Structures are given as structure tokens and as C-alpha cells.
Amino acid sequence: MEALKTTALILSLAISNLAFAQSDQLIAPDGFDKSNSSNPKGVVKELVYPSKTVGVDRKANIYLPPNYDPNQAYPVLYLLHGIGGDEREWLDQGTPDVILDNLYAEAKVQPMIVVLPNGRAMKNDRAEGDIFGAEPVKAFATFEEDLLKNLIPFIERNYKVKPGVENRAVAGLSMGGGQSMNFGLGNPEHFAWVGSFSPAPNTKRGEALLPRPYVTKSNLKLLFLSCGDKDNLMNVTTGAHEFLTEKGIPHTYRILPDHYHDFKYWKNELYFFAQLVFK
């Protein structure tokens, strides 16, 4: 009996240590997001896919890594934007292509395809008018169906993609961070890698966030949860962290000092998340 108690204590401490894990490195090096002319470049393309969920064709962008080979199979990261953005937000303000090009040049990242969709699944999906209105906010939840039933199948029909949950990731900032938590933990058979950068209040809470904990524990390779300590939405991150810890879901938990709800912080976190995913 004492041996069993000791084993249980060791396992509990191991889970706790994983849950509270802070990376030794919190801040990306100077120049991580600056283009280097000597580095091989990936390619960014706009694509259009049919959405039965919305009833119209929808736009997304795709990043193909340097030296992309259409005959080689790649894992896929779906990278989501915030409430005021669209399929161009990351590209226009977050330079993910530059960040990844630099990481590839240093051999710090696994070759992957990155898809940057519009997470507002409605016919007029532009970030205009009252973006906080009930209909646009609901459209971010509707995107779960559009992603699973329309966009992912389209990507997997048109690009050579590695099969299996271990080769699919979802990550995002703010509203997209909440979507990543909701979609990734809500569909553990689809996503093994989840990144949430300062998730917004759309993040589900309690059991709704973790409907199938046993499948999640079996399939999850990485849950990367972070926030800046000056972010007004930090309570969402800390609340999710506390719940996941209580449920024994291992996750990387990062709080960045003197960082806010902005692209300086989000770019920094993409730099670190990209180095962990698909490894």
C-alpha cells in the first residue's frame, strides 16, 4: 500500500511539474522577425476553398517552407488570427513567413505547411462594422465546423500531407487562441499540438473545454499556453492553466514579463511554439 502511495505521489508531482513548466527561454533573440536576404525563402499563396458550412467560397493563405517539395508529405499547422483580423492579419503584422524562414535557416524547425484561414465563418467575413456583435462572435465558433469539414479536407486533397493526428496542429492569438483551445481540446482525434497565445474570453471553461480528457491525454503531444503579464485578459490564461493542472493535463505554461496583448508578444510566442511542434 505504501509503495502505491509513493508511486501516486511521484506521478502527481511529475504532472504538476509539466503543467507549471516555464521555458528557460522567454524572449526571442534580436532579429528573429527580420528578413535575411541570404536565407532561403518559403512561399505564401492565397487559396480559395468551397465551404458548405458558410455556403460560399472562402479565402485562406498558405505558407510552403523553403525548398518545398510537392512530392514530400508534410505536417500542417493551422494558424488563427484575432477578433479584429482575417486571413491576412498574421502575414501583415506578425511576419510568420519571415520568422519561419529564419528558423529553417538555423535548422530549428521541422518542415511544415502553415495554413492561415479566416476564422470568422460567415458570408461577409471581413473585419468591419461591429466586430464584437453577436453574429460575428458566433461566426468564430462556427469556424470549428468549417475548419474540420471543409478547410482541412481541402488542404489534404490538394497538398501532400502526413496522415494522423500527430501531424496536425492548431495555434492562434487572442480570439484565435481561444479557438485553438476549444478546437484542439474539443477534437483530440484531430489535433495533437495546440498553441494558445493570450486566449480571449471565447475560451471555453471547465468540462466544456475538456470534453474527452482520456482521449486528450492519449493523443496530445503539446499544449502551449502563454500570456504577457501586462495583458488585460491574463485571467483567461491563468484560469485555463489552473483547470488543466487540476485535471492532470500536461502543458507548457509561459508568462512573459512586461508584455501586452500585441504582436510583439504574439510573434515571440510563435517563434518558440514553432520550434516545439511536430518534434
Image: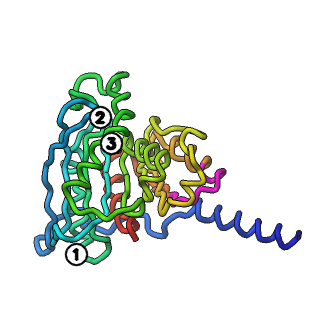
Q: Earlier in the sequence, mark 2 or mark 1?
A: 1
- In this rendering, position of residue 51 left or right of residue 229: left
Q: CA distance from mark 1 to mark 3?
A: 35 Å
| Whether residue 76 is situated above or below residue 41 in the rendered picture | above
Q: Which quadrant of the view contains residue 239?
A: top right
Q: Is residue 94 visible?
A: no
Was residue 250 drawn as part of the magenta stretch in this picture? yes
Q: Secondary structure at mark 3?
A: helix
- In this rendering, position of residue 115 left or right of residue 13: left
Q: Secondary structure at mark 1?
A: helix
The residue carrying mark 2 is: 120
Disc 3 marks which amino acid? Lys
The residue carrying mark 1 is: 105
Disc 2 marks which amino acid? Arg
Q: Quadrant of the C terminus?
A: bottom left
Q: Quadrant of the N terminus?
A: bottom right
Nearer the observer: mark 1 or 3; the answer is: 3
For disc 2, the neighbor class at 10 Å (few under 14, some 14 to 19, many from 20) is: many
Nearer the observer: mark 2 or 3; the answer is: 3
Was residue 36 drawn as part of the magenta stretch in this picture? no
Q: Position of residue 36 (x, y in %)?
A: 15, 70
Residue at the location (52% across, 57% down)? 253
| Whether residue 48 is situated above or below residue 34 in the rendered picture | above
| Whether residue 183 is situated above or below residue 220 in the rendered picture | above
- In this rendering, position of residue 18 left or right of residue 178: right
- Residue closest to the eye, 240 or 232: 240
Q: Secondary structure at mark 2?
A: loop
Nearer the observer: mark 2 or 1; the answer is: 2
Q: Which quadrant of the view contains residue 183?
A: top left
Span colored in magenta: 244-253
The residue carrying mark 3 is: 149
